[in-house]
Image: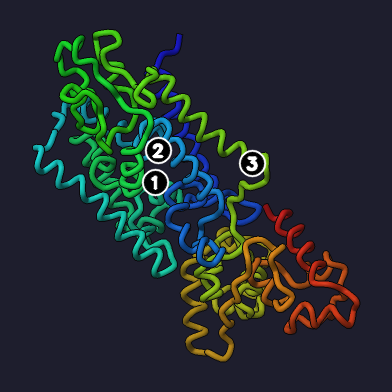
Amino acid sequence: MFGWKQVRYAVMFGFLAFITWVGYQHQVLGGGPGGVPTVDALCPFGGLESIYSWLSSGTWLRRVAPSALILFGAVIAMTLLFGRVFCGWICPLGTIGEISAGIGRKLGIKRVELSGSLDRTLKMLKYIILVVILYYTWTLGTLAWRDYDPWAAWMHLAAGWDEIVGTPWAFAVLFGLVIGAGLFIERFWCRYLCPLGATLGILQKFSLTKVSRNGETCIKCSKCTRSCPMGLAPMEVEKVTDADCIACGRCTESCPVEKTLFFSFAGKKTLSALLVGMLGVALFFGAYGTAKVTGYWQTFASTSVEALKDPVEGIFGWMNIDEVAQQVKLSPEKVLEIAKLPADTPRNVSIKKIEGVNDEVLKEDIKAYFIANPAEAPKPVKEVPENPDELKGSFTLEDVAAGYGLDTAEILKKAGWPADTPKNISMKEAGTPLGREPSDIRTAVKELLKQKQ
């Protein structure tokens, strides 16, 4: 018979193993429309980071996609209904933190609990970190936190030493503050530094599900307090209203007196720790399943805020030489020259798989080339609506192709327009002599984007 502990650990370790495998596959196969999603496209916090750019311009930050916002919405819903189940049952960093604490106990490291005033002060850090991240991300229009993000570091372990050298602070945070500090203080990262935890902590205050204690039957054994991975003290309150409760159930399951410590829903109905966890997990994966079935699950965005400002930022490791050339409006031969690659280099292979090529280095080399040759630099891409149905006839075919990351020839072919249709005048002007309408282009773009998913 499987109980709360077995089910919870199966969910935690199972999800950590699965998502780590996804990260490995991304390093091996690359991303893009036909590849494996980026870590940012599968992270709820990415949805929060990108929500401002999506609401203000309809575009996503580089590496983020609609899938991240769907997951963020699911996490908000599950927190308001059942508490911070994402943190206590699903979050991979939380699982790594608990594994680290378990290793610490095996090594005989004495568990540390900070004094009340110091603990309360340090817990404010995660809210400060959250505000700083959102301020710089929303004002700069880029993932300002990524170079320090321990989850991005974990998901790029398979990339090897080059990735560690490229983002040393992210790996320092992972090994120093998530794993290292976790040996002494369980879930150190979750308690004091996690920006997503800060977000969900605010929502936890309004959650319908709380841990409640029956003072009449409580024997004051302190087992619940000792078992809490977040350093809370359920024994001292009638109801745990602390923002840091992660709905893990370790306190309620450690209580030796039946019906003394339990989860209450809306202050009335009593729920078991197992039921709370499974309801939250079901909501999380149910949101994914619903989005997948209805066609809203997209782990790749055709363009980004950064790429609209500077097309070079639209270069990714999954692209081949021809796609890179198209993105920055250079000939493939010139891209090979800038990359210092021989002329016979395969142009249909992703640059990630070409020996000696690093996509980030290539981006910097191309930027340097455009600085030295400003007349050849591509112009910033005109923003296009996320929904192609909202494309106005004033957009040129070049705008449409660049905005959605498509090829003009493909669009014209799919729309049934002549291949020599002018691409630098408005769709309305281009279509009038042909007796065609911009709606042809809208339909073609939708179909091509659907094929890329």
Which residue is pictured at 15% across the width and 14% down the height?
A: 221
Callout 1 environment at 10 Å: few (<14), some (14 to 19), or many (20+)? some
* Amino acid type, label 3: Lys
| Residue bearing the label numbered 2 | 92
Q: Is residue 308 above or below residue 446?
A: below
Q: Is 279 left, or right, of 199 in this rendering?
A: right
Q: Nearer the viewer, residue 106 or 184?
A: 184
| Residue bearing the label numbered 1 | 154
Disc 3 to disc 2, how far (Cα)? Answer: 22 Å
Q: Nearer the viewer, mark 2 or mark 1?
A: 2
Q: Is 6 left, or right, of 175 in this rendering?
A: right
Tell me the quarter of the picture where residue 113 sits.
top left
Disc 2 to disc 1, how far (Cα)? Answer: 10 Å
Element class at badge 1: helix
Q: Looking at the figure, which quarter contains the N terminus? A: top left
Total numbered badges shown on the rendered structure:
3
Q: Is residue 357 above or below residue 336?
A: above
Q: Is 310 left, or right, of 191 in this rendering?
A: right
Among numbered discs 3 and 2, the one appearing first in the sequence: 2
- Residue 75, given in percent of the width and then of the height, sits at 45, 40
- Residue 185, given in percent of the width and then of the height, sits at 19, 36
Residue 292: assigned label: 3
Among numbered discs 2 and 1, the one appearing first in the sequence: 2
